[in-house]
Amino acid sequence: MADSVYRVVCPRDCYDTCVLLVEVENGVVVRVRGDPSHPVTRGVACPRAAGDPLRLVRGRIRYPYLRVGGKPDGRLVRVSWSEALDIAAAKLREVLREYGPSSVLHIDYAGNMGIVTWYYTRRFWNAIGAASTDYSLCSNTGHEAIGLHYGLSYGVLPEEFEKMEMIVFWGVNAAVSAVHMWLLALRARRERGSLLATVDPRVTETARASDIHLRPRPGTDVALAYGIARHLIVNDLVDKEFIERYTYGFERFAEEAIKWTPERVERVTGVPRRLMERFAEEYAARKPSVVFIGMGLARTPNGPDIIRAVSLLPALVGQHRGFYYSNSRGWLVNLALVTGEAYGAKPARIVSMAELGELLARGKFHYVYIYGVNAVESLPASHLVAKGLARSDVFVVVHDTHWNTTTRYADLILPAPTYLEKTDLPLSYSHATLTLSKMVVEPLGESKAEYEVIWELAKRLGVKDEWLYEDPLDTITKALEDALQEGSIRDLLEGRLVRLRQRPRDEYQTPTGRVEFYSTRAAKLGLNPLPQHRDLILAPDEYILLTGTHPLYTNSQFRETYGPHPPVVHVNPTDAKRNGIREGDRIALYNDHGEVHLKARVTDAVPEKTLWTTRHVIGLNGKPINVLAPPSRHMIGGTPILSAIKVKIRILA
């Protein structure tokens, strides 16, 4: 029997944002399980949460270290916190004096999505006017793409899934990457006979368990969405009253959709006509429904238009925002207050995460502070990121919980506590439930919270702004002043569940105040007002490389617990035969940007001319998969292209 059981919230970059119960014996975490009282978690913990007791102690950075002798091979010398902070502040002061704040860059992302860990820590960097990234790495393109037609990108809440008559998983392997939403979908099918459908080129775990599986060729989803729309329109299956009352530009959208005949759609996508038509008819008949639009689509070459096209399907059948992509822009939390932007503090410049590797390699920054992200592996053009951080004229500070690829390129390494060793308020981008996650064990070694470190740096630099040193819990209280629907701030601080208020589902923040099938904002920006299909043209020896999630890892986290990502790539049997590849062969994936070596797994789970591997795999040659990613970004939202990349393959001796 555990000495104590604590309620915490998992802050990782995950759809579920689980509320967990942590069992502690003699100051040691012995078990992590799901909280049965939470409307989404419902007592179920994923393998990552279950592995937290081990990850809490394995592979940890426990003390501050200074690198001597150059990056990445210089030796590490342990220093005191006082020495580390003095060095960090002195270098920062020097760079600010000689080069100005635009030469100082903080790189942070969703490794820990706690409001205090991620957002509050930006106060210091905004106060001194340091450069910031555009935070476009994952979902921004999808937000902006949906926004062209809806204003903001919020939609259905996860807890509503079990009330749906049809649930569509479009470009997302929910059984792996959104476990609890998948379980709610299974419950809907079990208890009310709901239909589950998957749209994915790959035979995923989600697809295998679905009632309908459409397998479009990679990048052809716009054509498929138009084909579905056409079937709804010509067979009088659309909701005319809804379209007239709540939408704009339907006639122009319909003109485009009509061009996508069943024969044309089948030729372009490879999806059989009868299967597409069955999907459309079920979708029209089964309401309410939800289309879960995968965030990974935003990182593909045709991602913006795919997301735009798919998001418009619910409006055809008369459903207000009948999709789920991310609800983060539907909450009313005042995050500008948390980051200090509400006080007028802002970055000197904002740089694209897609182009960051090139900028670093060219020496555009002289001081880089990294937290909450394994930057070398997560950013595109990984080799350029590593090359840039390794420069002798840039001082790199990494504040992290565990040793990783990026710490190899740090001049100064600082130990951070995990979410079990500090109090924070993780903010879900899916469900509306909120609760304070309190510290359950003392920080390991000399781990120091992110906000404490920026306070110390601010003091050493003589930054006097009082708001910078505000108690984080006081900041949270202010930020949530108008954001709660159920419960109070007192309930929250005392550990009870409260609910966030979501913007109205039938409110559209577009210029016309309606769902815009024909986007007036896109037209004003010089973009096509309608979603457009573009062919992904491959040379005879080229393949499309897709990447996805693995059930044991959250991006690069949990290697400490489960070992490295399996260094395998899935190859279709026809492609394997054509190239003389057998199961287990070592093959090279390469393009103009880099080369990664993996073992072949021959399977018809991937279609011809398509390869698949996990998103953060490191090759047998030590290269992360993102070395293959081009340093380019989408015009809409700026997200880099990290999947559906063109590569060539060859067998290794």
Image: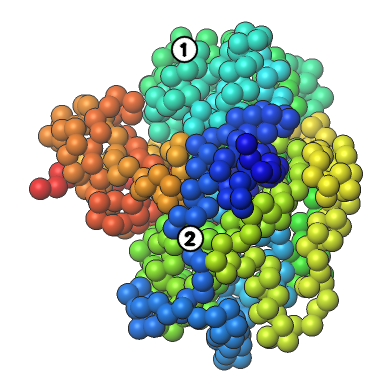
Q: Which residue is mark 2?
A: 60
In the image, residue 624 sits, relative to residue 133, either above or below, namely: above
In the image, residue 629 sits, relative to residue 499, either above or below, namely: below
Badge number at residue 275: 1
Residue 16, position in %: x, y?
62, 37
Is the Cβ of the residue at disc 2 closer than 8 Å to that at disc 1? no
In the image: residue 478, left or right of residue 643: right
What residue do we see at 29% from left, 24% from top? 604
What residue do we see at 44% from left, 62% from top? 403
Q: Nearer the viewer, residue 193 or 381?
A: 193
Residue 12, position in %: x, y?
58, 48
Q: CA distance from mark 2 to mark 1?
A: 50 Å
Mark 1 burial class by Cα count in 10 Å: few <14, some 14-19, many 20+: few
Mark 2 burial class by Cα count in 10 Å: few <14, some 14-19, many 20+: many
In the image, residue 548 sits, relative to residue 556, either above or below, namely: above
Whether residue 632 is visible, yes or no, is: no
Identify the amino acid type marked 2.
Arg
If the image is split into quadrants, where does the N terminus sit? top right
Identify the amino acid type marked 1.
Leu
In the image: residue 648, left or right of residue 322: left
State which tag comes first along the sequence, 2 or 1: 2
Residue 528, quarter of the rendered image:
top right
Q: Nearer the viewer, residue 232 or 90?
A: 90
What residue do we see at 15% from left, 44% from top? 651
In the image: residue 477, left or right of residue 408: right
